[in-house]
Amino acid sequence: MKQPELGQKILALRKQKGFTQEELVEQCNINVRTIQRIEAGDVSPRSYTIKAILEVLGFEYSAIFDKKYIPSKFDSTLGINKDKIYKQLYNAMIFGIIYFIIGFFEIGVEFLSFEKESTIFNVVFIIIKALSFISIFLFFRGFVIVGGLFNNYLLQISSFLVIVFTLFFNGLDIVSLFVLEDFIGILGFSKLITYGVLSIVIGIAIMKLKDFGDLAKWTGILEVVTGICFLLIILSPIGLVTQAIVEIFEIILIYKITLQVKKLN
């Protein structure tokens, strides 16, 4: 990591720990002027100086500056290229925004599907479901990548399961237009239970991304709340509202992670 990003990172870590510059230098044997120049981006300190500062702040050098993507068994299935992590995370952010927008149309056509009797409606329904899957696939593929970057296997597997179950349920939704009309209610109930469980697991996994402080914490909490609302069925309308908020938080989280990856590269 080069200046001025290096100085900004050390400044952020110092403030996160609640240290003043004077308190920091007392423990790592450097003078105040040096830490001031490092944080201002005026000098590029040697690695042992950075390690000494991070040791006092309670962070590992490798965890902050040597973060690399750890390949997993999901890579080939999801088409993840470990040499293009930044681009794939950027795409995840973009498709997260697209998924957020499509979600409103998806909710609308699902409500209308109870009274459908139109070929045009069926075509629109299929298109929206296809776009929904493509966008959620690329969005949550980003979280599989994030899991690999931060050694968070729970986030990897739960995000992968979101992709798998979305493909499964979207396929059933399309089939229900023609041959499973009597099972629409059961299908809806099954989706609430499945996504309720997955939301809770993903929420717990996101809260483990401690590098991103309150953003990860509240994103995870809201995801867990959403999952509980879905599981309780009767509170599912509230879950839809919190889910929309969670998606915004997740997009911002992916954006911040994308910026970090760009700086490291």
Image (tube, grey):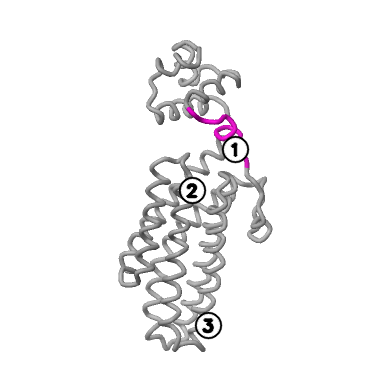
Taking depth in this image into account, of 121 and 109 the one nearest to the observer is 109
Left-right relation of 243 to 78: left
Marks 3/2: CA–CA distance: 33 Å
Q: SS of the residue at dot 3?
A: helix
Magenta stretch holds residue 60: yes
Marks 2/1: CA–CA distance: 16 Å
Q: In this rendering, which labeled residue sits more in front, label 2 or label 1?
A: 1
Q: Residue at x 62, y 40 (%)?
A: 68
Task: Determine whether 184 is above or below 253 in the image.
Answer: below
Residue 211, image x, y percentages: 47, 39
Residue 82, image x, y percentages: 66, 47
* Magenta segment boundaries in residue numbering: 58-68
Say few, some or many: other residues with alpha carbon within 10 Å of mark 1 (under 14 / 14 to 19 / 20 or more). some
Q: Amino acid at mark 2?
A: Ile
Q: Amino acid at mark 1?
A: Lys
**Residue to which mark 1 is pinned:** 67
**Residue to which mark 2 is pinned:** 254
**Residue to which mark 3 is pinned:** 175
Taking depth in this image into account, of 149 and 130 the one nearest to the observer is 149
